[in-house]
Image: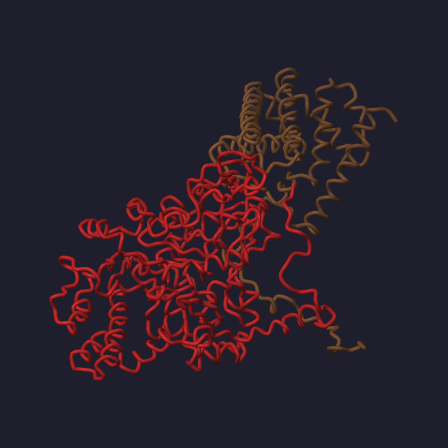
Chain colours: A red, B brown
């Protein structure tokens, strides 16, 4: 057992309002630069929808992630020799148009236009060429589906969803949205690392953050293709790949990443997960239906004395173990089993986890959906007992989060509903009747667990949501530089030389 | 010193020294600038028709040049049967034309696509121009002074060997036609341009990808030895 620590984020999608504050916080902090205009290390997609870059989940097209091979797993993108052969032209690289061409506006025209009968306008210009352009796409172009049925229809997650349900979704797609905020998943078995011919991408042992060493990056751009989540971006100006760094400079000083910190809906949680590095391979090569179970087994119990002993052996101090025990990520993923990785079937073992969203409780009267002729106290149970009639198809959510396994999603949604119904009964009616208790048991939970889930879901403080271990970078600095005071003021984020494009 | 000595003794050594010193400096001290500077994200279709033929054509022809320099005897043995000589020469010429087609495509793409123009430096254009000259003179030599693989082993190979063994014999080059001298000296121009232009990406070809482990994990504290001569914090300070 080789115990390592990982910083993991939980996205509680039931709370996401799709406001894009996270995206903007990230953009302002990291990608507001030449060559990075089109990058959204954090983006929020409307679901159902085709996502960013368009159709990123279509791995027959983009060839991201891993597949089962003769022995273990192999990259979908290439074998090693083929990777070298494809250096001159990468056949699976997204085109800039798959994201969008970055643009700005010629604002000075507003001041310099000659006097005339018309108001001057600031025409759009390409951020690349500076020439006037016709904007055909932009950030969140398909937000809330932009009034078009095309985006939802092109969602790759409709696979195996019965066509009558798809038709139903097409009718009501204007009212059933959920939002999917995405950052780099900082995978345990990252395909970008494996695909990089230069070996420029690596995973940090201390906290699992996956980083690009831009000094070693040679722009072979295999990472862009190999990442099934399309979360490595190519900077067209500097000729280097870039990606989400999980705001490690913030985490190292005990602050939550900018996206998580700024989250208006407070949907994000962060904490340490301990995992067994020796069993990553085993975790990645299971059958599709076993992948999530295996990943949960790779993640270790921080209260287990054997795990604690092994963790200390591999150099984790008490601060990290303590943080792992208080970790909200551990609770959501392993204790309550409410959070799932996005697209486990990509076999990269994503380490950011999602609590799937509940459908709107009751809002419209639809044939076969929620029956409003029931007495109010039974309406809840109607949805609980008939989840397959929920307005977001279980199969769709299963394709997103559970590799198609509907039972996993059903179990989570039932637990979330149990929390909701139980707490409502408790606060509105003051007592819990037998029907409610039966529902609690059948959801596989307990009143105590419900109370805990409720606390962490609805009224957590910032200290409950973000549990960071003491990174002790000062000790790291000491071991590298010797006397840290001798180098005071020299360390930090930035470049010794400006990040200029080479010739 | 005559032109011949200058071009084929002094210049090669100066160029080689510049190439080595410049490249080592750039790779070690300015690693951020070392990149193949791919522009595929901005334009893919023309790049496919340019980059693939150009790179494969040039790589194969350069390897053939290298084989002739390292194993001239082998080439001579191969060429003893005329049909084999013809096959070799025709293959080489075909590859060169293929590379020329790709290069033409790359140049066309660089000047005609506005997004590509936005990421083009003057040095990029210079390198493309040099490459065009070199490929064209190579093709001219292959057609006008036919069977270079046959006579080259007797002329160029001894010259290059004389350079490598530090006993330069420029007189071997002196009687050759202008276009051959031009083709040879242009190679040394490439050596000069190498560390200063995007040509430097050639040495970063990631052969080690064939053998490295798939997953790379780095530890800040484990990977670096704790410095032994560590002074106590604050020692010697006022």
Tell me if residue A228 comes above or below residue B112 in the rendering.
below
Where does the image place residue B236, in percent across and percent down from the top left? Answer: 81, 77
Count the labels in the image: 0
Position of A342 relative to B23 (above/below): below
Along the line of sight, the residue nearer the viewer: A137 or A410: A137
User: Can I make out residue A274 in this image?
Assistant: no
Residue at the far left in the pictured view: A373
Q: Position of residue A180 (x, y in %)?
A: 37, 58
Horizontal relation, residue B169 to residue A229: left or right: right
Q: Residue A399, percent across and down?
A: 29, 56
- Which one is nearer the viewer's eye here, A400 or A289? A400
Horizontal side of A116 relative to A305 (left or right) equals: right
Seen from this angle, which residue lies furthest top? B144
- Residue B1: name its quadrant: top right
Residue occupying the point 37% across, 69% down: A296
Residue B39 or B96: which is nearer the viewer? B39
On the rendered structure, is A371 left or right of B61? left
Question: In the rendered view, would you say A453 is above or below A152?
Answer: below
For the C terminus of chain A, the image quarter is: top right
Q: Which image quadrant for residue B97? A: top right
Residue A228 visible from this viewpoint: yes
Q: How far across and how far down the image is residue A398, in percent?
A: 28, 59
Residue that protrudes farthest toward the right in the picture: B1
Q: Residue at x 70, y 44 (%)?
A: B23
């Amino acid at each position: 057992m080789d115990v390592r620590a990982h910083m993991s984020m939980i996205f509680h999608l039931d709370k996401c309002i799709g406001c894009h504050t996270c995206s903007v916080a990230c953009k302002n902090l990291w990608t507001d630069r030449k060559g990075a205009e089109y990058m959204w290390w954090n983006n929020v997609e409307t679901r159902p929808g085709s996502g960013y870059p368009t159709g990123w989940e279509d791995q027959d097209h983009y060839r991201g992630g891993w597949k089962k091979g003769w022995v273990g797993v192999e990259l979908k993108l290439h074998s090693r020799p083929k990777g070298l052969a494809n250096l001159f032209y990468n056949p699976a690289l997204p085109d800039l148009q798959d994201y969008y061409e970055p643009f700005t506006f010629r604002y000075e025209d507003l001041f310099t236009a000659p006097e005339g009968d018309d108001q001057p306008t600031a025409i759009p210009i390409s951020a690349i060429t500076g020439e006037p352009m016709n904007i055909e796409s932009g950030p969140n172009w398909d937000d809330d589906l932009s009034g078009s049925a095309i985006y939802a229809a092109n969602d790759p997650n409709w696979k195996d969803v019965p066509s009558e349900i798809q038709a139903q979704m097409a009718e009501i797609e204007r009212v059933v949205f959920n939002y999917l905020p995405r950052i780099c998943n900082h995978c345990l078995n990252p395909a970008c690392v494996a695909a990089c011919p230069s070996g420029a991408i690596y995973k940090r042992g201390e906290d699992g953050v996956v980083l690009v060493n831009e000094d070693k990056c040679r722009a072979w751009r295999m990472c862009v293709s190999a990442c099934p989540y399309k979360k490595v971006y190519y900077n067209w100006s500097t000729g280097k790949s870039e990606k989400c760094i999980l705001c490690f400079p913030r985490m190292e000083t005990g602050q939550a990443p900018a996206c998580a910190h700024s989250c208006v809906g407070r949907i994000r949680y962060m904490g340490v997960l301990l995992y067994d590095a020796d069993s990553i391979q085993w975790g990645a090569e299971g059958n599709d239906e076993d992948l999530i179970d295996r990943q949960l087994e790779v993640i270790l119990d921080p209260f287990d004395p054997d795990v604690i002993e092994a963790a200390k052996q591999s150099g984790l101090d008490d601060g990290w173990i303590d943080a792992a025990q208080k970790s909200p990520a551990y609770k959501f993923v392993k204790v309550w089993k409410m959070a799932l990785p996005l697209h486990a079937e990509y076999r990269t073992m994503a380490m950011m986890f999602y609590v799937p969203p509940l459908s709107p409780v009751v809002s419209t009267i639809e044939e076969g959906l929620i029956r409003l002729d029931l007495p109010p106290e039974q309406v809840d149970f109607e949805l609980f007992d008939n989840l397959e009639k929920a307005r977001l198809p279980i199969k769709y959510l299963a394709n997103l989060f559970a590799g198609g396994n509907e039972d996993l999603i059903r179990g989570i949604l039932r637990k979330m509903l149990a929390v909701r119904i139980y707490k409502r009964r408790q606060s509105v009616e003051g007592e819990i009747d037998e029907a409610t208790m039966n529902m609690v048991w059948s959801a596989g939970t307990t009143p105590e667990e419900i109370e805990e889930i409720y606390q962490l879901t609805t009224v957590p403080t910032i200290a409950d949501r973000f549990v960071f271990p003491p990174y002790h970078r000062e000790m790291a600095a000491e071991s590298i530089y010797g006397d840290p005071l001798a180098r005071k003021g020299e360390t930090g984020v930035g470049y010794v030389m400006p990040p200029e494009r080479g010739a | 010193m005559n032109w011949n000595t200058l071009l084929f003794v002094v210049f090669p050594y100066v160029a080689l020294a510049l190439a080595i010193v410049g490249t080592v400096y750039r790779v070690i001290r300015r690693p951020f600038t070392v990149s193949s500077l791919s522009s595929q994200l901005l334009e893919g279709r023309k790049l496919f028709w340019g980059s693939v033929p150009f790179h494969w054509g040039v790589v194969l022809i350069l390897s053939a040049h290298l084989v002739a320099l390292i194993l001239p005897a082998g080439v001579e043995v191969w060429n003893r049967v005329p049909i084999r000589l013809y096959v070799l020469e025709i293959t080489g010429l075909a590859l060169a034309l293929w590379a020329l087609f790709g290069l033409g495509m790359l140049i066309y793409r660089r000047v005609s696509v506005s997004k590509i123009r936005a990421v083009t430096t003057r040095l990029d254009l210079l390198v493309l121009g040099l490459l065009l000259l070199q490929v064209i003179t190579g093709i001219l030599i292959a057609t006008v002074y036919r069977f270079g693989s046959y006579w080259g082993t007797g002329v160029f190979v001894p010259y290059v060997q004389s350079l490598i063994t530090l006993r330069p014999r420029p007189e071997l080059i002196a009687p050759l036609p202008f276009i051959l001298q031009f083709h040879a000296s242009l190679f040394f121009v490439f050596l000069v341009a190498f560390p200063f232009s995007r040509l430097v990406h050639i040495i970063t070809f990631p052969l080690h990808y064939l053998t490295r482990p798939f997953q790379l994990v780095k530890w800040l504290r484990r990977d670096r030895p704790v410095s032994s001569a560590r002074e106590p914090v604050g020692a010697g300070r006022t």
